[in-house]
Amino acid sequence: MATHVVENQPPTFENYNVFTSDRALNDAIAHLSPEASTGEIAELGGLAGRPDVIALGFEANEHPPELRTHDRFGNRIDEVRFHPAWHALLRHATSAGLHGTPWQDAQPFAHLRRAVKFYVWGQVESGHGCPISMTYAAVPVLREQPELAEWFAPLTRPEYDPRQIPIAQKSSALCGMGMTEKQGGSDVRANTTRAEPAGGRGPGREYRLTGHKWFCSAPMNDAFLVLAQTSGGLSCFLVPRVLPDGTRNAFAIARLKDKLGNRSNASAEVEFDATAGRLIGDEGEGLQRIVEMVNYTRLDCTIGSAGLMRAALAAAIHHATYRRAFGKTLIEQPLMQNVLADLALESEAATVLFVRVARAIDDSARDERAAALKRIGTALAKYYVCKRAPVVVGEALECLGGNGYVEESVMPRLYREAPLNSIWEGSGNINALDVLRILRKQPEALAAWRDELAPALGEPRVAAQAKRLENELREADLGEAQARAVAERMAQLWQAALLLSYAPAEIGDAFVTSRIGGEWGRTLGTLPRGAALRAIVERATAG
């Protein structure tokens, strides 16, 4: 019915390079790692902006995974079936080396380049980043156990092989983790899953696990790092889905979680019944082994949140550029400029912080200061950036009005994803408390953070806030109830120092004036008079 002409609607946001159009990201790389090669990142950025690739993200979420506990003859199979879009996304991600590849990449800045690619590609779709991230984080744990060397090469090859076959026959592999249980959640010391030696006892030997895991993401991965109790205490095991003889390991999937978001990815409840697993490290070392893995997945949570912010911001600016209201495009409206500029500040601050932490990972193998900065930086960034993502995405969604609340827009999916990274790998409280523990037990980490602030202490507002925080940190009675406040202020000061050093003056000044100087409201879009709103928005414009 030709009742009207469609007008005043923005064109579809596609056919742009997600990487090259991100000025904040490119400037961060140029200043923090100017020698890093970005050709492969630009190639991935072009792929991420293609219409057919953007469609994969929608399709993978519109067709969530399905559990098949038995085949048609009644045999137990415990398989999860995924839509072809899921497999296509994983094939692109592994081909780009987003999983274990950096651990065998001899080129400079392997981890920083991988972090940037994870950020760029994650803007297509978040759910498939889970198995990619867990595989990346598992490799440094597994390579410390010589008896498990057969897993190293498949986990690092830039290929995708979803077949359920023995690892010796796989061209590539993905790894997951199983930590939390019903009764404990983040308190993994409360785990009740037991592991008994199948023969000899000790590192690399086979044990039999009996118990459950309340959350096991991506249950079709080839293996999982699993925590279980032994006579020596909480221990870490590699549990394969398929045994060397080709038979299925005892890995029963009870059900898939019906989640708020992250719908493309399967999160399962699983049962172990004399399930074969091989001990990593000594008995009783499970927590320290899994913490090593979690430190890397926490960084990926930070990167994922920064990517969600950037995707939402880019979509909001695109909409505002073409949509007209009250005689002007939205982007010309002063109040909308304030909102978009505030969103852009949050996005750029998150971006430069994750790039800095990723650079510290590259440097940590040969630099003790970088290793200390990586430790506290991961916890700070995970806490604060992941807390900001839901606020930023929610405000960006509102920029599209009712259109932003409709599933045909990408905004509802981004909004559902936004809270998850703050929950995964330790909730906000866990990470904030981790910051306090680091401050108390690792003075070298606090010293490394201070060094990061030093170049910005010539800015009076930064210097005053840093001094105030230092005085509080010296107080003996600084307790757990202040953990979030401490982590927030440390992260904001670090972001301010980075932006003052590497971003245009209008970015650094607006961030310091609002976040550090206090000339800011309790909602986004409250930047003070004098902020260079249009210049900030133009810098953040993609496409």
Image (spheres, grey):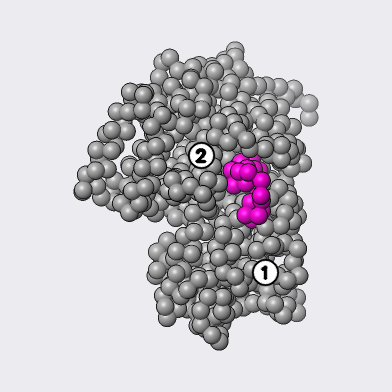
Q: Position of residue 416 (x, y in %)?
A: 55, 46
Q: Pick the quarter of the image with the C terminus.
A: top right
The amino acid type found where label 1 is placed reads: Glu
The amino acid type found where label 2 is placed reads: Arg
Residue drawn at x 36%, y 42% is 447
- Can you identify the residue that label 1 sits on? 150
As for residue 158 lying within the magenta part, the answer is no
Disc nearer the start of the sequence (2/1) = 1
Picture disc at residue 286: none
Residue 264 seen in render: no
Q: Position of residue 270 (x, y in %)?
A: 56, 70
Residue drawn at x 55%, y 63% is 141
Given the current orientation, which residue lies at the most extreme right position? Answer: 2
- Can you identify the residue that label 2 sits on? 356
As for residue 116 lying within the magenta part, the answer is yes
Given the current orientation, which residue lies at the most extreme bottom position? Answer: 199
